Amino acid sequence: MTLDSFLNLLLDSYTTMFIWLVALFVGCSFFEYLSPCNPGQTKWRKDIITDVLYYFVMPFFTRFVRLFFLAMGIYILFYNQPEMTIQKFLTSGYGPLAQLPIWLQAALIFIVSDFILYWTHRWFHGAKLWKYHAIHHSSPNVDWLSTYRFHPINVWFTFTLVDVCMLLVGFAPAAIAELSVFNTIYSAMVHANVSWTFGPFRTIFASPVFHRWHHTTQAEGMDKNFAPTFPLLDIMFGTFYMPKGRLPEAYGVNGSNIPDGFIGQIVWPFKQH
């Protein structure tokens, strides 16, 4: 892949992101109006610009550049052979797993990565890493747009670990990229201000109420519901919490001095001792 083609990929990705921003705004706003979890929660909050900046700025460093350079590094270290060009590696991968259909590779990555993400999420709730993850919890108004409020250290560590594991075992980089649209939609859905519990499927797939209990400042929900997609992981490891007939009410970080602005939040963890 040449520099020009990579830059064109970035441009196309940003165009796609803008389209998704509009689509998510329309779709999520509609469902938040029909079935709000917290009816009094405002949509036009004072930190909305901060979350819009996260939506457009962070993916450049934490998604596109990260995956590209990880794939390049792994190709140079492990797969740089005459019959395997960088273009072929990026699109087709290398080894037995890469011979599977892209959709099946993406499905396997999705399942395995959920296990890794569960544990990295728990680690970031620990004392040493919490200051980076606290940024994601800092909004007192959790909604679909606050999905993207992540400190880069949090994202780099978490998803670099996932991507390296997937690339090293032989999955194609293209299969990892295939998941991006689904992850965008699903992540926005579970952060949306809606009262969905998924009823009989509440222990199978993460719902908005499931994840909102994770974001609550209420003591009963603290350090619960870490799984991105499959609550079965929380059930297995004793961190599932989703009481029937009750909804979380308060969000944010108790006793926090985290600033509202984008730059302030990026530098805030480095000021903590």
Image (tube, rainbow, N blue to C red):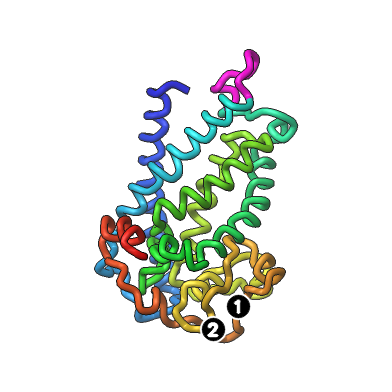
What's the residue type where badge 2 is placed?
A: Glu
For residue 49, say whether it is visible. no
Residue linked to disc 2: 220
Placement of 19 over or under 43, stated as above or below? above
Side of 167 relative to 265 (left or right): right
Image location of residue 9, percent across then percent down = 42, 32
Point 54% across, 73% down: residue: 223
What's the residue type where badge 1 is placed?
A: Tyr
Under tag 2, what secondary structure? Answer: helix
Image location of residue 200, percent across then percent down = 68, 74
Specify the farthest residue to the bottom. Answer: 245
The answer to the question of whether label 1 and label 2 lie on touching residues, with beta carbons closer than 8 A, is yes
Residue linked to disc 1: 241
Quadrant assignment for the C terminus: bottom left
CA gap between label 1 and label 2 equals 8 Å
Q: Quadrant of residue 210?
A: bottom right
Point 53% across, 58% down: residue: 186
Q: Is residue 82 magenta?
A: yes
Q: Which residues are magenta?
A: 79-89
